[in-house]
Amino acid sequence: MRKMLFLVTAWLLSAGVFAQQNGELWMDVDGKHINAHGGNVIKYGDKYYWYGENRPYRGFTTEAGVGVYSSTDLQHWKDEGIALAVSEEPGHDIERGCIMERPKVLYNAKTGKFVMLFHLELKGRGYEAARVAFAISDSPTGPFRFIRSTRVNANVWPFDYTKKQVEAAKQTDASKWKKWWTPEWMAETQKGMYLWSDMAGGQMSRDMTVYVDDDGKAYHITSSQENLTLLVSELTDDYLDFTGKYNMVAPGGQNEAPCIFKHGGKYWLICSGCTGWEPNEARMFRGESIWGPWTQLPSPFEGEGGYRDFSAKKTFGAQGTYIFRKNEEAGSPYIFMADIWNPRHLSESLHLWLPIGFKTDGTPVIRWQPAVPY
Ligand code: GAL
């Protein structure tokens, strides 16, 4: 029965009869559900490339790597295979059985290379490594070559930290605070308690995205400090390293799944809360610049509808992963790209892509639609 459904959907899609429907399986041109999660889409030449976690049907560790699909219309996707494969070498950072999450690929016009950044957890160590990893390729479909994985900004203070703030952070001691969410604990967290405890080893980096600004400078935005605080860090011109300039956004705010775009001269950061694979209410921040100041606003999700019985209050059942446009020059709508996670069968996690609208005051708003009108 399921196979029949797959075949019929694939045929209808290839015949251009209907668009990919939010909250349903999205078939590639061979009739297989698109197994690319937590990823991003880029345009290169006349094609779009969709990168994402290739997840197993059972279990949650990475057995294959980061997958890539190509398309000319964002509807018909061809499976281009594994862009970055796991390593078969025991002890390798990306040994089969590690966890690769939220891969993001950027094309670097200066070097002519494709650079992939992703969240990496080492095999058998749960989520404790909290690293970002870099890989590089000459071609959009790979093979990407793994470069290294690392924590971020070791022994560097946020660029906007004053001497007074540095001194206050140095007085904190994370080992003392077993009980979270008390007012005292929050005060210490906001003083930079976790920043200080990870100063020597480097800051944690889990859910992440990347953003290239109009001037070509690229930034890495990540959930750090036990997923309590976002870090915005500047990347070097080749996108293969950090310059050391970074700052913190919403310390203690517990934001995950960061997605960002710029519109009307402002930066808009849309995140989720931290409830693992379970959907929760999105959060939004408006930045006057990439370095802030950031103002927190209500979730941009509004209106009726959603996946199953998940309402706008639960981000329609999804968690964001990236924001992109079909055609920048033509001013196509920004697309909020998200995953409807299926923790029992992660490979069958669904996709939800919705256009971002704007209220009269310029604030983003995202409403449910069955499909994206590009
Ligand atoms: C989510 C996160 C996912 C994945 C998952 C694991 O909160 O956004 O990328 O890490 O937790 O439970």
Image (cartoon, grey):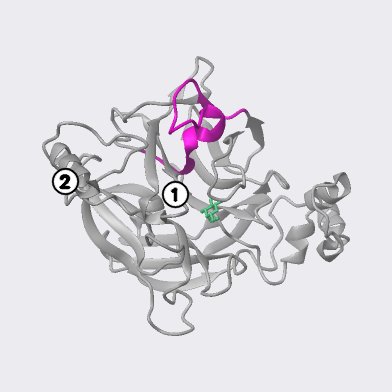
Question: Image height check: is 343 above or below 156?
Answer: above
Which region shows up in magenta? 298-324
| Residue at the image point whose x is 33% and y is 39% from the top | 24
Amino acid type indicated by mark 1: Asn
Asked whether residue 352 appears in the rendered view, the answer is yes
**368 or 47, which is in the foreground?**
368
Q: Mark 1 points at which residue?
A: 342
Question: Residue 367's quadrant in the figure?
Answer: top left
Horizontal and vertical percent for residue 180? 80, 52
Amino acid type indicated by mark 2: Leu
Question: Image height check: is 79 above or below 363?
Answer: below
Determine crowd level at label 2: few under 14, some 14-19, many 20+ residues with C-alpha closer than 10 A.
some
Q: Is residue 166 left or right of residue 221?
A: right
Determine crowd level at label 1: few under 14, some 14-19, many 20+ residues with C-alpha closer than 10 A.
some
**306 or 100, which is in the foreground?**
306
Outermost residue toward the bottom in this view: 90
| Residue at the image point whose x is 81% and y is 62% from the top | 174
SS assignment at label 2: helix
Asked whether residue 219 appears in the rendered view, the answer is no
| Residue at the image point whose x is 55% and y is 45% from the top | 278
Horizontal and vertical percent for residue 241? 50, 65
SS assignment at label 1: loop
**5 or 296, which is in the foreground?**
5
- Tell whether position 301 is magenta: yes
Q: Mark 2 points at which residue?
A: 7
**339 or 175, which is in the foreground?**
339
- Tell whether position 180 is magenta: no
Q: Do the residues labelled 2 and 1 touch (CB within 8 Å)?
A: no
Counting the numbered discs, the total is 2
Q: Is residue 284 left or right of residue 196?
A: left
Horizontal and vertical percent for residue 54? 36, 60
